[in-house]
Image: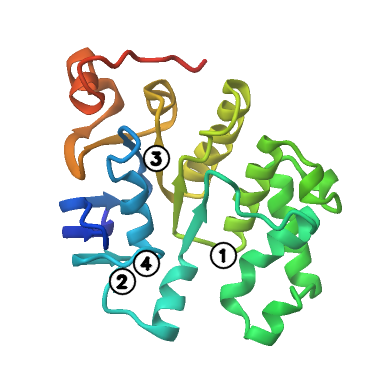
Amino acid sequence: MKNIIEIKNLHKIYAGGTHALKGIDLNVKEGEFCILLGLSGSGKTTLLRCLNRLIEPTSGDIQIDGEDVIAAKGQKLRFIRRKIGMIFQQFNLIKNLSSLTNVLTGKLGYSSLLHSLAFSKNKTDVEIALENLQRVGLKDLAEKKIKNLSGGQQQRVAIARALMQNPKVILADEPVASLDPATANSVMKYLGELNKKDKITIICSLHFLSLARKYGTRVVGLKDGEIVFDGTPKEIDKKRFKEIYGEDAEEVEIR
């Protein structure tokens, strides 16, 4: 398997002086389900958002599918971002629009501005959007407004929206942090299916080691902006868990 993501000596220093990423070196192979573990403030979100330039890195090198992310500008950056689906903790959906229309906004990177503002509903796009809603079990709720859906349903709409890009990589920034355990498992199950069936590479930040063990093929532990662990979920024993989370941390299971 080739590397689809290559990160070299990546630093991010925020305006206030916080050194959020300290020389990150990380390669991710095609088809991996890579889990980022670490405390809040460890650098997980910063790393994910640097990958698609939602946050501008201070220095370093990022290659995704052979493309130089750091050097890309304008149309080139938009082209690279088409390959990268993004799923957020707070869903980032338009509450007063339907599930279907929200999913269709996943095509915005392929459209002109005028076309995008109209949320184009050509027949082909609608058919693909409905197929993607079907994949996350929500086709029957296509016309229901987002504000009337549960948190778990909203996150599944967000997954369907990401699929509209036909992405090679999905970045999921703590996608289950605001969900109850049963719903969290449901959302992770859909991400796992995309990884296995569609061979989409997934990088997902989580707080729960039990979910990492269940769905991840690889775990990268971050602490204070540095990688302190890189291996399989099974390799994280009690000692390594405390290296990532601190001596006072206790593992919480989500079943």
Which residue appears at 34% of the width and 60% of the height? 51
In this figure, which residue is indicated by the disc labeled 3? 205
Instruction: Kindly state the secondary structure of the residue where label 1 is placed.
Output: loop
In this figure, which residue is indicated by the disc labeled 2? 69
In this figure, which residue is indicated by the disc labeled 4? 53
- Residue 165 tag number: 1
Circles 2 and 4: CB atoms closer than 8 Å: yes
> What separation in Å lies between label 3 and label 2 (alpha carbons)?
21 Å
> What separation in Å lies between label 3 and label 4 (alpha carbons)?
17 Å
Which residue type does callout 2 highlight? Val
Circles 2 and 1: CB atoms closer than 8 Å: no
Q: Earlier in the sequence, mark 3 or mark 1?
A: 1
Which residue type does callout 4 highlight? Arg
Instruction: Kindly state the secondary structure of the residue where label 2 is placed.
Output: loop
Which residue appears at 31% of the width and 52% of the height? 47
Local crowd at mark 1 within 10 Å, few (<14), some, or many (≥20)?
A: many
User: Please, which colouring scheme is shown?
Assistant: rainbow
Examine the rendered structure and indicate whether residue 211 appears above or below residue 149.
Answer: above
